[in-house]
Amino acid sequence: MVTFDEIGKLDQCDNPAKLWKYILEISRKYGFRATIYACPPPHRKPTHPETIIRYAGISDEEFQKFVIAGLIKQGHLTTDNSLQKGAAFRWTEIADLTSSEQKFQKLKQAANSIDIDEGWIFPLFGPQSRNGLASCGKPLNAELMDKKTGLQFHIFAQMAHLRFCQLTPDLYGIEKSLSKREMQIIAWAAKGKSNAEIGTILELSESSIDSYMRRAFAKLDVHDRTSASVKAISMDLLRT
């Protein structure tokens, strides 16, 4: 299966086009006839118009019908429910994630009829919440669906995703950046300090701290200090 040398060669891909070509080369070499990659903007759904999507081994019509209109828009597969699993999982295991198993089974039957029957889905994690999904499907033999193979390809997919993030550092800018003061306040809040305590530390009134906090909430699209702290850290805005 995938070797460390093959993973190491990801660093030799110096642009996204070369990276995608190499990913397809490895996927096909080991017997997967379909490959899909999706990288939405941070904290966005895969259906977001700015999502980076690449696929091969599946027609445009099949992709739109079974992946976009089917798995994603019907709510069977989301970035959140797949990332929560953390590990690679099989297409057939999507039934365990969806809240509408009956719809999923109908979609699965239709997909099976045109040889879209099995494959792996890999949750991918990146810097500043640049998370995504990858999938290798249409395996040429059953051995490609054992857990050891799934783990090896998940490692390869994760490293390829990180390489893509390295090659495109400015792809998604933060729409509303926190000011230096807002970052200071959220950083102290992340350490458990109250508004009054933060005001004493920064020599500001408690009402000023509250105003800065509310502006930070709006920029981070959250409604409480705990969520603000967690989100700011996950977006690499704070170092703790």
Image (cartoon, helix red, strand yellow):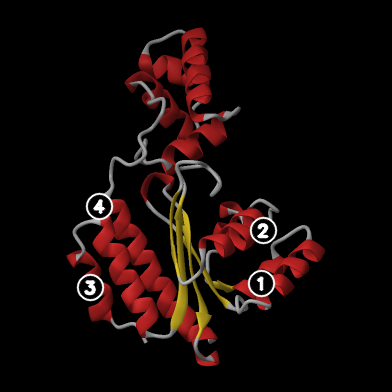
Query: Along the horizontal axis of the image, is 96 left or right of 131?
Result: right
* Position of residue 204 measured from the top left corner of the image (x, y, whole percent): 41, 10
The amino acid type found where label 4 is placed reads: Leu
Q: Is residue 15 above or below residue 110?
A: above
Earlier along the polypeptide chain: callout 3 or callout 1? 3
Earlier along the polypeptide chain: callout 4 or callout 1? 1
Disc 1 from disc 2: Cα separation: 10 Å
Q: Which residue is mark 3?
A: 8
* Position of residue 237 measured from the top left corner of the image (x, y, whole percent): 37, 36
Quick check: marks 1 and 2 in contact, CB under 8 Å? yes
Label 4: how many residues lie within 10 Å, few (<14), some (14-19) or many (20+)? some
Q: Secondary structure at mark 2?
A: helix
Earlier along the polypeptide chain: callout 2 or callout 4? 2
Nearer mark to the viewer, of 2 and 4: 2
* Position of residue 101 measured from the top left corner of the image (x, y, whole percent): 78, 64
Q: Secondary structure at mark 3?
A: helix
Nearer mark to the viewer, of 3 and 4: 4
The amino acid type found where label 2 is placed reads: Gly
Residue 85 visible, this angle: no
Earlier along the polypeptide chain: callout 3 or callout 4? 3
Earlier along the polypeptide chain: callout 3 or callout 2? 3
The amino acid type found where label 3 is placed reads: Gly
The amino acid type found where label 1 is placed reads: Ala
Res. 111 mark? 1
Q: Which residue is mark 2?
A: 70
Query: Along the horizontal axis of the image, is 171 left or right of 5?
Result: right
Quick check: marks 3 and 2 in contact, CB under 8 Å? no
Label 1: how many residues lie within 10 Å, few (<14), some (14-19) or many (20+)? some
